[in-house]
Image: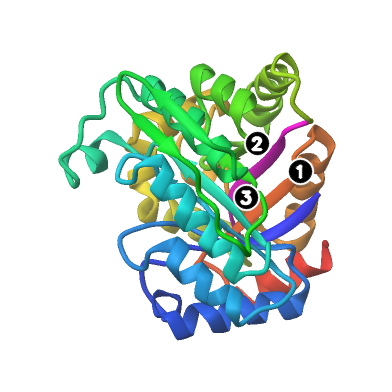
Amino acid sequence: MKIGINSGAASGPETTIDGLIERAQSMEKLGFDCFWMAHMFGLDAMTALALVGQQTSTIKLGTAVVPSYPRHPLVMAQQAATTNAASKGRFTLGIGLSHKPIIEGMFGLDYSKPARHMDEYLQILAPALNKEKVDFSGERYKARGQIAVTESASVPLVVAALGDAMLKLAGTYADGTITWMTGPKTLEQHIIPKLRLAAEAADRPLPRIVAGIPTAIVSDKDSATARINKGMKMYGQLDSYRAMLDREGADGPADIAFVGDEAELRRKIQRLRDIGVSDLNCAILGVGDHDTTAQFLASEL
């Protein structure tokens, strides 16, 4: 199992281009496989990772994740290919639906029929990322053309998929899934088997499973747990994440976080390896020391 680091801080040095590049360079020196970036309300993730790609050489880069609704799939493919070119072929595009309060409340777009939206979106995006010609006319999207960024080969694609319909789409059209707020029991019993079944039915290779997990080495677990549940409360209130927490039997985000001493985190990481997770995407939390947690995770590579 590969281990990567997620950057999606809402405050601090990683909210600046220079700070983000510095963090990516330090994670590269520690030997991490991938530097993932959440697309929030600050820096545009693909633009930022294109710049990171120019200042790093070995660490892979990926978005975790870019919302699909605001960008036409051919525009998404063009920007992804450009980011891939800037990073010399080290980029993975992670996309997702986002959430109704953001898509409708912030962008003023229609969030009805999200699975139908993603079905059409992927029928355009997936071939476009492989530099194939696209000629598609659907209920929501029309596209005709070809994205041909000279310095970019095919761009790997992972889709945030939690429900049955999205898992089927991810397995059918994409290279795998990327999850958040999803614990090991839910990954083992729900995400992995359904995604693999869909990929097999579509005659696709074994899909990639990228598990995003809040992570921290701490000495006072009770205090850290309380802080996590308070700071990440909103995740437990979003329908898609709440459904995954309920499947896991988790009251809140802290229950699926990897928080504790080194022995506890080592056991939890091993369980992900055992159930077939291909990539661990660690979002290091501020409840512990970032460098201590990063160095421990590097020792698990």
Q: Which residue is mark 1?
A: 278
Question: Which residue is label 3 attached to?
Answer: 155
Which quadrant of the figure has residue 13?
Answer: bottom left
The residue sitting at 74% across, 53% down in the picture is 264
Element assignment for label 1: loop
Dot 3 lies on which element? loop
- Position of 16 with respect to 89 (left or right) is left
Q: Quadrant of the C terminus?
A: bottom right
| Residue type, mark 2 in image | Gly
Front tag of 3 and 2: 3
Q: Is residue 209 magenta?
A: yes
Q: Which stretch did the figure color magenta?
A: 206-215
Q: Residue at x 30, y 60 (%)?
A: 41
Quick one: SS at disc 2?
Answer: strand
> Does residue 19 sit above or below 274 in this rendering?
below
Residue 68 rendering spot, x and y as whole percentages:
38, 41
Whether residue 174 is visible, yes or no, is yes
Three-letter residue code for mark 1? Ser
Q: Earlier in the sequence, mark 2 or mark 1?
A: 2
Measuring from the top left, give residue 286's x and y in whole percent: 49, 69
Crowdedness near tag 1: few (<14), some (14–19) or many (≥20) residues, C-alpha within 10 Å: some
Give the residue at mark 2. Answer: 176
Q: Please name the residue shown 71% across and 76% down the image.
A: 28
